[in-house]
Image (cartoon, rainbow, N blue to C red):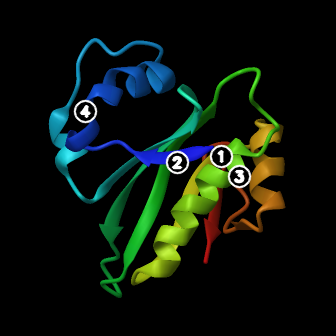
Amino acid sequence: MNIVRITTENIELVDKALSFIFSSSSSVNINYFSNPNNYFYVAMEDEEMVGAIYGHEFDRPDTGKKQLFIYSLDVKKGHRRKGYATLLVNHFIDIAKSGDYHNVFLLANDDNMPAIKLYDSISGKKMNKKVVEQILYAWY
């Protein structure tokens, strides 16, 4: 399994990656992939895209330290519960640990039990009880 960052340098993967996350890729925001503060990774098994994660880096207004926000995570049906999602989330955590980041965080719908079990299993800390039927997780 290989984790690949999608950038303008491997733009041939963009349409496939966007279709993976969004079910269609009618338009591409090329600026997203050229911005170093945006992160879009795919998990490849041989030549098959089996998972994808994307998010954004931004500065905290109080400390000036960076944070990574995971906006979306998806694993292809037939490949779920095989560790791909864990590897992709841990990849974001490793990025944060290797840089000057405050944390990595995401929002999870409180009725998405598979996602909640995943985040709990990789030591995600629930930061609040609920924000509009979502649970905030943070690592690091």
Give the image location of residue 1, x and y in percent. 63, 43
Count of numbered marks: 4
Q: Is residue 88 left or right of residue 96?
A: right
Q: Say which element carries label 1.
A: strand
Q: CA distance from mark 1 to mark 2?
A: 23 Å
Considering depth in this image, is 16 or 46 the residue closer to the camera?
A: 46
Q: Which residue is mark 1?
A: 108
User: Amino acid type of disc 2?
Assistant: Ile
Q: Which circle's residue, 3 or 4, is located before the other in the chain? A: 4
Camera-near label (4 vs 1) is 4
Residue at mark 3: 86
Place of residue 91 in the rendered image (x, y in percent of width and height, measured from the top left): 56, 60
The residue closer to the viewer here, 128 or 86, is: 86
Q: CA distance from mark 3 to mark 4?
A: 25 Å
Q: Nearer the viewer, mark 3 or mark 4?
A: 4
Residue 11's label in the rendered image is 4
Q: Residue furthest front?
A: 46
Badge 3, how many Cα within 10 Å: few under 14, some, many 20+?
some
Q: Amino acid at mark 4?
A: Ile
Please name the amino acid that badge 3 sits on. Thr
Q: Earlier in the sequence, mark 1 or mark 2?
A: 2
On the image, numbered disc 2 is attached to which residue? 3
Dots 4 and 2: beta carbons under 8 Å?
no
Task: Tell whether 124 sits left or right of 37.
Answer: right
Element marked by disc 3: helix
Q: Earlier in the sequence, mark 1 or mark 3?
A: 3
The x, y position of residue 7, in whole percent, is 27, 44
